[in-house]
Image (cartoon, rainbow, N blue to C red):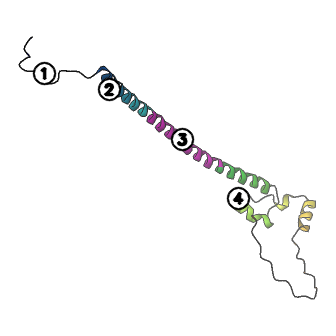
Amino acid sequence: MEAPPANPPAHVHRLPKVVRLALVGLTVSMFLALVGIGLMAGAVYQANQYVQGRGEYRDREAVRMEQETEESIRRAMCDLLDQLPEGGLLDRPRVKYGCGPGIPVSDLTPEEQAQLANRAPQVVAPERTGLPPAPPRPVLPKS
């Protein structure tokens, strides 16, 4: 028999092969899991940025459509009011929508002028029933 070496190594045996393979597999799987989590986080971030961008685009588009709708309504009202005779009850809507004065009464035919004069609001006197007049009713807003 031979004599043992003078300075024996501190650790002379290796880990079993199964343990070494398990450690290598665990390390590789942890690395792949971290890579996967990083890729998923990037995809979620991109999706979030896309959704926020679409939301801002949608909001801008909704405001633009609302403005276009209001302007088209105003133009339609002005087109209608400009085809009617000037003056009378239509002055307030014309001011509200920023429309022109309408057709001058002098440009109307004599028949149309007579018809317009006949449509002047007439005050109807309440009929007498012998009862005191009823108090005015409150006007409820339409819903």
Callout 4: few (<14), some (14-19), or many (20+) C-alpha neighbours within 10 Å? Answer: some
Q: Quadrant of residue 28?
A: top left
Name, please, the residue furthest toward the top: 1
Q: Nearer the viewer, mark 3 or mark 2?
A: 2
Image disc number at residue 97 = 4
Residue placed under numbered mark 1 in the picture: 9
- Decide which of tag 4 and tag 1 comes sooner along the chain: 1
Q: Is residue 62 magenta?
A: yes
* Mark pair 3, 1: CA separation: 63 Å
**Bounds of the magenta segment:** 40-65
Instruction: Locate residue 50, reporting x and y percent.
Output: 52, 38
Circle nearer the N terminus (2, 1): 1
Element under disc 3: helix
Task: Let me know if residue 54 is in the magenta part.
Answer: yes
Q: Amino acid at mark 2?
A: Leu
Mark 3 → mark 2, Cα distance in angstroms? 42 Å
**What residue sits right under mark 3 in the picture?**
51
Q: Name the front one of labels 2 and 1.
A: 1
Which secondary structure lies at badge 4? helix
Which of the two labelled residues, at mark 4 and mark 3, occupies the earlier sequence position?
3
Tell which tag, 4 or 3, sits nearer the viewer: 3
